[in-house]
Amino acid sequence: MARLVFGMNQSLDGYVDHMRFAPDPTLFRHFIAEAEGQAGSVYGREMYEIMRYWDDDQPDWGPDEQAFAAAWRRQPKWVASRTLKAVGPNATLLGPDLAAEIAALKAEHTGEIEVAGPVLAQSLTALGLIDEYRIYLHPVVLGDGAPYFAGPRPPLRLVTHDRIGEDVVRLTYVPA
């Protein structure tokens, strides 16, 4: 059975915004390794549309960007959306019963399935489907934006923490 994991970069004041801060090379290589090992990813519409950037090679990409794009393209993607009518390569639209669809994905796969985006994570948290939360805490303060926890904060228990690169601490929690 697969485990559903929600992990994102977060500012010290609790916000996620890939346009206002980004991973350093060490953390980016960590994310490449994670993407290479994941059984797939579940996206909400907004995060899926952002990630579609990796569908097409860019002339300024170095080896790390190329490696991430290859890993992202290879893995299956499932998209929860009420508005999209079609999705790109290696992606499937989920039906209206999100709880049943995600439970089926967890039952049919092994390993980790990434949950991408705080809005989708809020829905999956409310359904009790997320098995692990990974906060990649960066030493920046944004003051506003999209919060990591888009809804009520679930009761959590810290299971591990580790430093990645010079400035980031990964905090790993499971539901309490």
Image (spheres, grey):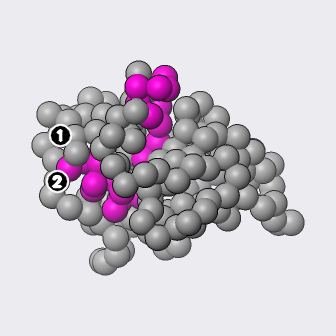
Can residue 116 be seen by looking at this rendering?
no
Classify mark 1: residues with Cα within 10 Å, few (<14), some (14-19) or many (20+): few
Q: Under tag 1, what secondary structure?
A: strand
Q: Are marks 2 and 1 in contact (CB under 8 Å)?
A: yes
Q: Quadrant of residue 40?
A: top right
The N terminus: image quadrant: top left
Q: Rounded to the nearest whole Å, what is the CA distance between mark 2 and mark 1?
A: 8 Å
What amino acid type is highlighted by mark number 2? Arg
Closer to the camera in the image, 26 or 89 = 89
What amino acid type is highlighted by mark number 1? Leu
Q: Residue at x 42, y 66 (%)?
A: 82
Chain part drawn in magenta:
105-126
Residue for badge 1: 156
Asked whether, in this view, residue 29 is left or right of residue 173, the answer is right
Q: Position of residue 74 (x, y in %)?
A: 70, 40
Q: Position of residue 112 (x, y in %)?
A: 47, 31
Q: Is residue 141 above or below residue 125?
A: below
Residue 110: say if magenta. yes
* Farthest residue, direction bottom: 144
How many labels were placed on the picture?
2
